[in-house]
Image (spheres, rainbow, N blue to C red):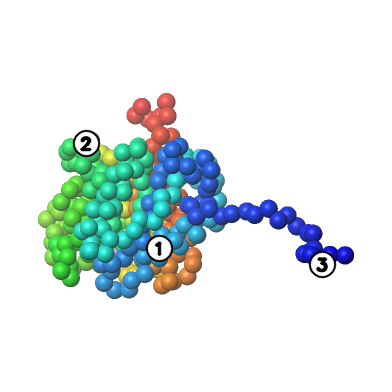
Amino acid sequence: MSAGPPDVGDPTPVWTPFSFLGLDGEAAALDGARVVVLPVPYDSTTSFRAGARHGPRAIIEASYHLEDYDPELDADVSAVGIHTAPFLEPHMDGPRPMLDRVRGAATQFLDMGKLVGLVGGEHSLTLGHVEALARRYPDPYSDQGLTVLYLDAHADLRDEYMGTRWGHASVARRIADLCPVVQVGVRSLSQPEMSFSKEGGVATTYWPPQGMWSSGGSGPDIVSGIVDRLPGDVYITVDLDVFDPAVVPAVGTPEPGGMDWGQVTALLQAVGQARRIVGFDVTELSPELGPPASAYVAAKLVYKLIAYATLCYNINRRPGAPGV
Ligand SMILES: [Mn+2]
Protein backbone atom coordinates (compact mmCIF):
# COMPACT_ATOMS: atom_id res chain seq x y z
CA MET A 1 0.00 0.00 0.00
CA SER A 2 1.39 3.42 -0.91
CA ALA A 3 0.93 6.24 1.62
CA GLY A 4 0.20 9.13 -0.83
CA PRO A 5 -2.24 11.95 -0.18
CA PRO A 6 -5.88 10.91 0.05
CA ASP A 7 -7.65 10.96 -3.30
CA VAL A 8 -10.34 13.55 -2.43
CA GLY A 9 -11.49 16.80 -4.04
CA ASP A 10 -10.72 18.28 -7.44
CA PRO A 11 -7.04 19.31 -7.75
CA THR A 12 -7.59 21.51 -10.83
CA PRO A 13 -6.08 24.94 -10.01
CA VAL A 14 -8.37 27.98 -10.13
CA TRP A 15 -6.68 31.40 -10.42
CA THR A 16 -7.95 34.83 -9.42
CA PRO A 17 -6.70 37.29 -12.05
CA PHE A 18 -5.43 40.61 -10.75
CA SER A 19 -8.04 42.69 -12.54
CA PHE A 20 -11.08 44.78 -11.74
CA LEU A 21 -13.95 42.42 -10.75
CA GLY A 22 -11.51 39.54 -11.23
CA LEU A 23 -12.50 39.51 -14.91
CA ASP A 24 -10.45 37.46 -17.33
CA GLY A 25 -10.63 36.20 -20.91
CA GLU A 26 -12.66 38.23 -23.38
CA ALA A 27 -14.38 40.30 -20.67
CA ALA A 28 -11.00 41.76 -19.64
CA ALA A 29 -9.12 41.79 -22.96
CA LEU A 30 -7.89 45.19 -24.11
CA ASP A 31 -9.07 44.70 -27.70
CA GLY A 32 -12.77 44.44 -27.00
CA ALA A 33 -12.91 46.55 -23.82
CA ARG A 34 -14.92 49.77 -23.82
CA VAL A 35 -13.28 50.82 -20.53
CA VAL A 36 -9.72 50.73 -19.22
CA VAL A 37 -9.13 50.88 -15.46
CA LEU A 38 -5.78 52.62 -14.95
CA PRO A 39 -4.33 52.07 -11.45
CA VAL A 40 -1.79 54.68 -10.30
CA PRO A 41 -0.20 54.00 -6.89
CA TYR A 42 1.23 57.47 -6.19
CA ASP A 43 0.93 59.81 -3.18
CA SER A 44 4.18 61.77 -3.12
CA THR A 45 2.74 65.29 -2.71
CA THR A 46 0.46 64.24 0.16
CA SER A 47 1.02 66.65 3.05
CA PHE A 48 -0.98 65.18 5.96
CA ARG A 49 -1.41 61.41 6.18
CA ALA A 50 0.10 59.47 3.26
CA GLY A 51 -1.06 56.04 2.13
CA ALA A 52 -3.12 56.65 -1.04
CA ARG A 53 -0.43 54.77 -2.94
CA HIS A 54 -2.02 51.62 -1.50
CA GLY A 55 -5.46 52.63 -2.80
CA PRO A 56 -5.41 51.00 -6.27
CA ARG A 57 -4.50 47.54 -4.98
CA ALA A 58 -7.16 47.72 -2.24
CA ILE A 59 -9.83 48.85 -4.70
CA ILE A 60 -9.05 46.08 -7.19
CA GLU A 61 -9.03 43.43 -4.45
CA ALA A 62 -12.31 44.75 -3.03
CA SER A 63 -13.84 44.67 -6.53
CA TYR A 64 -13.63 40.85 -6.53
CA HIS A 65 -16.60 40.90 -4.14
CA LEU A 66 -18.86 43.07 -6.32
CA GLU A 67 -21.75 41.50 -8.21
CA ASP A 68 -21.47 41.92 -12.00
CA TYR A 69 -25.21 42.58 -12.17
CA ASP A 70 -26.42 46.07 -11.21
CA PRO A 71 -30.08 46.12 -10.14
CA GLU A 72 -30.30 49.92 -10.49
CA LEU A 73 -29.62 49.70 -14.24
CA ASP A 74 -30.86 46.12 -14.67
CA ALA A 75 -27.65 45.22 -16.50
CA ASP A 76 -24.47 43.18 -16.23
CA VAL A 77 -22.25 46.22 -16.54
CA SER A 78 -19.10 44.14 -17.07
CA ALA A 79 -20.47 43.14 -20.49
CA VAL A 80 -19.13 46.46 -21.84
CA GLY A 81 -15.63 44.98 -21.41
CA ILE A 82 -13.31 46.24 -18.67
CA HIS A 83 -9.57 45.96 -19.12
CA THR A 84 -7.31 46.56 -16.12
CA ALA A 85 -3.97 48.14 -17.05
CA PRO A 86 -0.84 47.27 -15.05
CA PHE A 87 0.15 49.68 -12.27
CA LEU A 88 1.60 52.88 -13.68
CA GLU A 89 5.04 53.29 -12.12
CA PRO A 90 5.52 56.42 -9.98
CA HIS A 91 7.97 59.05 -11.30
CA MET A 92 10.05 60.29 -8.39
CA ASP A 93 11.44 63.44 -10.00
CA GLY A 94 8.43 65.40 -8.71
CA PRO A 95 4.75 65.86 -9.45
CA ARG A 96 5.08 67.49 -12.89
CA PRO A 97 6.98 64.57 -14.48
CA MET A 98 4.47 62.21 -12.84
CA LEU A 99 1.59 64.13 -14.45
CA ASP A 100 3.33 63.90 -17.84
CA ARG A 101 3.48 60.14 -17.37
CA VAL A 102 -0.23 59.95 -16.50
CA ARG A 103 -1.06 62.11 -19.53
CA GLY A 104 0.96 59.75 -21.74
CA ALA A 105 -0.75 56.65 -20.37
CA ALA A 106 -4.22 58.15 -20.74
CA THR A 107 -3.43 59.36 -24.27
CA GLN A 108 -2.35 55.87 -25.28
CA PHE A 109 -5.75 54.44 -24.31
CA LEU A 110 -7.75 57.41 -25.63
CA ASP A 111 -6.08 56.94 -29.02
CA MET A 112 -7.47 53.39 -28.99
CA GLY A 113 -10.98 54.75 -28.39
CA LYS A 114 -11.16 53.62 -24.76
CA LEU A 115 -12.84 55.35 -21.85
CA VAL A 116 -10.26 55.62 -19.06
CA GLY A 117 -11.12 55.30 -15.36
CA LEU A 118 -8.07 56.28 -13.31
CA VAL A 119 -7.85 54.72 -9.85
CA GLY A 120 -5.57 56.61 -7.44
CA GLY A 121 -3.49 57.39 -5.75
CA GLU A 122 -3.62 61.04 -4.73
CA HIS A 123 -5.89 63.60 -6.30
CA SER A 124 -3.19 65.54 -8.18
CA LEU A 125 -3.15 62.69 -10.75
CA THR A 126 -6.47 63.93 -12.15
CA LEU A 127 -4.69 66.75 -13.96
CA GLY A 128 -2.65 64.41 -16.18
CA HIS A 129 -5.80 62.62 -17.29
CA VAL A 130 -7.68 65.88 -17.93
CA GLU A 131 -4.71 67.25 -19.90
CA ALA A 132 -4.90 64.22 -22.19
CA LEU A 133 -8.62 64.83 -22.80
CA ALA A 134 -8.63 68.64 -22.97
CA ARG A 135 -6.37 68.78 -26.00
CA ARG A 136 -9.15 66.98 -27.93
CA TYR A 137 -11.49 69.94 -27.39
CA PRO A 138 -10.58 73.00 -29.50
CA ASP A 139 -12.91 75.21 -27.43
CA PRO A 140 -13.53 73.70 -23.99
CA TYR A 141 -15.86 76.59 -23.08
CA SER A 142 -18.37 75.94 -25.90
CA ASP A 143 -21.40 73.64 -25.96
CA GLN A 144 -19.08 71.10 -27.58
CA GLY A 145 -16.56 71.62 -24.81
CA LEU A 146 -15.37 69.72 -21.76
CA THR A 147 -16.27 70.44 -18.14
CA VAL A 148 -14.73 68.79 -15.08
CA LEU A 149 -17.22 67.83 -12.37
CA TYR A 150 -15.09 67.89 -9.21
CA LEU A 151 -16.37 66.08 -6.11
CA ASP A 152 -14.20 66.88 -3.11
CA ALA A 153 -14.45 68.12 0.49
CA HIS A 154 -11.62 70.53 -0.36
CA ALA A 155 -11.46 73.25 -2.99
CA ASP A 156 -7.84 72.43 -4.08
CA LEU A 157 -7.62 75.95 -5.54
CA ARG A 158 -4.28 77.11 -4.13
CA ASP A 159 -2.08 78.58 -6.82
CA GLU A 160 0.84 76.85 -5.16
CA TYR A 161 1.36 74.87 -1.97
CA MET A 162 4.53 73.76 -0.19
CA GLY A 163 6.67 74.83 -3.15
CA THR A 164 4.77 73.21 -6.03
CA ARG A 165 1.97 74.27 -8.39
CA TRP A 166 1.30 70.65 -9.36
CA GLY A 167 0.36 69.06 -6.02
CA HIS A 168 -2.91 67.88 -4.49
CA ALA A 169 -3.77 71.33 -3.08
CA SER A 170 -3.61 73.03 -6.52
CA VAL A 171 -5.19 70.48 -8.86
CA ALA A 172 -8.55 72.22 -9.32
CA ARG A 173 -6.75 75.53 -9.93
CA ARG A 174 -4.59 73.98 -12.66
CA ILE A 175 -7.61 72.28 -14.27
CA ALA A 176 -9.40 75.64 -14.25
CA ASP A 177 -6.55 76.91 -16.47
CA LEU A 178 -7.66 74.34 -19.09
CA CYS A 179 -11.45 74.09 -18.95
CA PRO A 180 -14.47 74.91 -16.76
CA VAL A 181 -14.62 73.27 -13.31
CA VAL A 182 -17.81 72.62 -11.34
CA GLN A 183 -17.14 71.67 -7.73
CA VAL A 184 -19.56 69.80 -5.46
CA GLY A 185 -19.25 68.87 -1.81
CA VAL A 186 -16.71 71.50 -0.78
CA ARG A 187 -16.63 72.30 2.94
CA SER A 188 -12.98 73.12 3.64
CA LEU A 189 -11.06 75.94 1.94
CA SER A 190 -8.95 79.03 2.58
CA GLN A 191 -10.20 82.57 2.13
CA PRO A 192 -8.14 83.18 -1.06
CA GLU A 193 -9.61 79.97 -2.50
CA MET A 194 -13.11 81.20 -1.67
CA SER A 195 -12.34 84.53 -3.37
CA PHE A 196 -11.05 82.76 -6.50
CA SER A 197 -14.27 80.75 -6.67
CA LYS A 198 -16.45 83.82 -6.05
CA GLU A 199 -14.70 85.76 -8.79
CA GLY A 200 -15.79 83.07 -11.24
CA GLY A 201 -12.66 80.90 -11.34
CA VAL A 202 -14.85 77.84 -10.72
CA ALA A 203 -18.50 77.13 -9.83
CA THR A 204 -18.71 75.76 -6.29
CA THR A 205 -21.59 73.99 -4.52
CA TYR A 206 -20.73 73.98 -0.84
CA TRP A 207 -21.95 71.09 1.33
CA PRO A 208 -24.44 70.77 2.77
CA PRO A 209 -26.21 73.11 0.34
CA GLN A 210 -27.92 76.01 2.07
CA GLY A 211 -31.51 75.37 3.06
CA MET A 212 -31.30 71.72 2.20
CA TRP A 213 -30.96 70.29 5.69
CA SER A 214 -34.55 69.06 5.83
CA SER A 215 -34.52 67.15 2.55
CA GLY A 216 -31.11 65.60 3.08
CA GLY A 217 -29.16 67.78 0.68
CA SER A 218 -29.61 66.23 -2.73
CA GLY A 219 -33.09 67.14 -3.92
CA PRO A 220 -33.79 67.33 -7.64
CA ASP A 221 -33.20 71.11 -7.64
CA ILE A 222 -29.62 70.71 -6.48
CA VAL A 223 -28.95 67.92 -8.97
CA SER A 224 -30.50 69.64 -11.99
CA GLY A 225 -28.81 72.92 -11.04
CA ILE A 226 -25.46 71.14 -11.18
CA VAL A 227 -26.23 69.32 -14.46
CA ASP A 228 -27.24 72.67 -16.04
CA ARG A 229 -23.72 73.95 -15.38
CA LEU A 230 -22.22 71.17 -17.53
CA PRO A 231 -22.72 72.36 -21.12
CA GLY A 232 -20.77 69.77 -23.13
CA ASP A 233 -18.95 66.54 -22.37
CA VAL A 234 -18.09 65.80 -18.75
CA TYR A 235 -15.07 64.43 -16.90
CA ILE A 236 -15.89 63.26 -13.37
CA THR A 237 -13.31 63.29 -10.61
CA VAL A 238 -14.11 61.96 -7.15
CA ASP A 239 -11.87 62.58 -4.16
CA LEU A 240 -13.33 60.05 -1.73
CA ASP A 241 -13.23 62.61 1.09
CA VAL A 242 -16.31 64.18 -0.55
CA PHE A 243 -18.20 61.44 1.29
CA ASP A 244 -18.98 61.86 4.94
CA PRO A 245 -16.26 60.13 7.04
CA ALA A 246 -19.02 57.80 8.31
CA VAL A 247 -19.24 56.42 4.75
CA VAL A 248 -15.53 56.47 3.77
CA PRO A 249 -13.25 56.98 6.81
CA ALA A 250 -10.09 55.65 5.08
CA VAL A 251 -8.90 58.95 3.56
CA GLY A 252 -5.93 61.12 4.42
CA THR A 253 -7.94 64.27 5.23
CA PRO A 254 -11.45 63.38 6.44
CA GLU A 255 -13.94 66.27 6.77
CA PRO A 256 -17.22 66.03 8.67
CA GLY A 257 -20.55 66.92 7.08
CA GLY A 258 -20.04 65.15 3.75
CA MET A 259 -22.23 63.54 1.13
CA ASP A 260 -23.77 60.10 1.52
CA TRP A 261 -23.85 57.23 -1.00
CA GLY A 262 -27.32 58.03 -2.31
CA GLN A 263 -26.53 61.72 -2.85
CA VAL A 264 -23.33 61.02 -4.80
CA THR A 265 -24.78 58.26 -6.99
CA ALA A 266 -28.02 60.20 -7.68
CA LEU A 267 -25.95 63.11 -8.94
CA LEU A 268 -23.61 60.96 -11.04
CA GLN A 269 -26.47 58.99 -12.58
CA ALA A 270 -28.26 62.23 -13.52
CA VAL A 271 -25.06 63.45 -15.18
CA GLY A 272 -24.70 60.13 -17.03
CA GLN A 273 -28.24 60.39 -18.35
CA ALA A 274 -27.90 63.98 -19.54
CA ARG A 275 -24.29 64.21 -20.71
CA ARG A 276 -21.52 62.18 -22.30
CA ILE A 277 -19.03 61.13 -19.60
CA VAL A 278 -15.64 60.93 -21.36
CA GLY A 279 -13.39 59.94 -18.46
CA PHE A 280 -13.31 59.68 -14.69
CA ASP A 281 -11.20 58.98 -11.65
CA VAL A 282 -11.62 57.87 -8.03
CA THR A 283 -8.78 59.00 -5.77
CA GLU A 284 -7.45 59.34 -2.22
CA LEU A 285 -8.35 55.97 -0.70
CA SER A 286 -5.79 55.26 2.05
CA PRO A 287 -6.83 51.74 2.99
CA GLU A 288 -4.65 51.52 6.10
CA LEU A 289 -6.38 54.54 7.69
CA GLY A 290 -9.77 52.91 8.06
CA PRO A 291 -11.90 49.77 7.82
CA PRO A 292 -11.95 47.55 4.70
CA ALA A 293 -15.48 48.79 3.93
CA SER A 294 -13.95 52.00 2.54
CA ALA A 295 -12.19 50.11 -0.27
CA TYR A 296 -15.44 48.32 -1.05
CA VAL A 297 -17.32 51.64 -1.34
CA ALA A 298 -14.56 52.93 -3.64
CA ALA A 299 -14.70 49.80 -5.84
CA LYS A 300 -18.48 50.01 -6.09
CA LEU A 301 -18.21 53.68 -7.03
CA VAL A 302 -15.77 52.81 -9.84
CA TYR A 303 -18.26 50.22 -11.12
CA LYS A 304 -21.14 52.73 -10.89
CA LEU A 305 -19.11 55.28 -12.84
CA ILE A 306 -18.37 52.68 -15.53
CA ALA A 307 -22.12 52.01 -15.70
CA TYR A 308 -23.16 55.67 -15.82
CA ALA A 309 -20.51 56.45 -18.45
CA THR A 310 -21.26 53.54 -20.77
CA LEU A 311 -24.96 52.73 -20.33
CA CYS A 312 -27.02 55.70 -19.11
CA TYR A 313 -26.42 58.18 -21.93
CA ASN A 314 -27.07 55.56 -24.60
CA ILE A 315 -30.17 54.32 -22.83
CA ASN A 316 -31.43 57.89 -22.57
CA ARG A 317 -30.86 58.36 -26.29
CA ARG A 318 -32.53 55.18 -27.52
CA PRO A 319 -35.05 55.81 -30.34
CA GLY A 320 -38.15 57.43 -28.94
CA ALA A 321 -36.44 58.90 -25.91
CA PRO A 322 -36.91 62.63 -25.27
CA GLY A 323 -34.68 64.84 -27.39
CA VAL A 324 -33.73 62.16 -29.96
MN1 LIG B 1 -9.94 66.37 -0.77
The circle drawn on residue 55 is 1
Q: Nearer the viewer, mark 3 or mark 2?
A: 3
* x 14%, y 62%: residue: 159
Mark 3 belongs to which amino acid?
Ala
Along the viewing direction, whichever of 156 and 153 lies nearer the viewer? 156
Image quarter where the C terminus lies is top left
Q: Earlier in the sequence, mark 2 or mark 1?
A: 1
Residue 197 picture quarter: bottom left
* x 49%, y 65%: residue: 293
Q: Earlier in the sequence, mark 3 or mark 2?
A: 3
Image quarter where the N terminus lies is bottom right
Q: Which residue is mark 2?
A: 143
In x, y percent, where is residue 290?
44, 71
In x, y percent, where is residue 201?
15, 54
Q: Which residue is mark 3?
A: 3
In x, y percent, where is residue 96?
20, 58
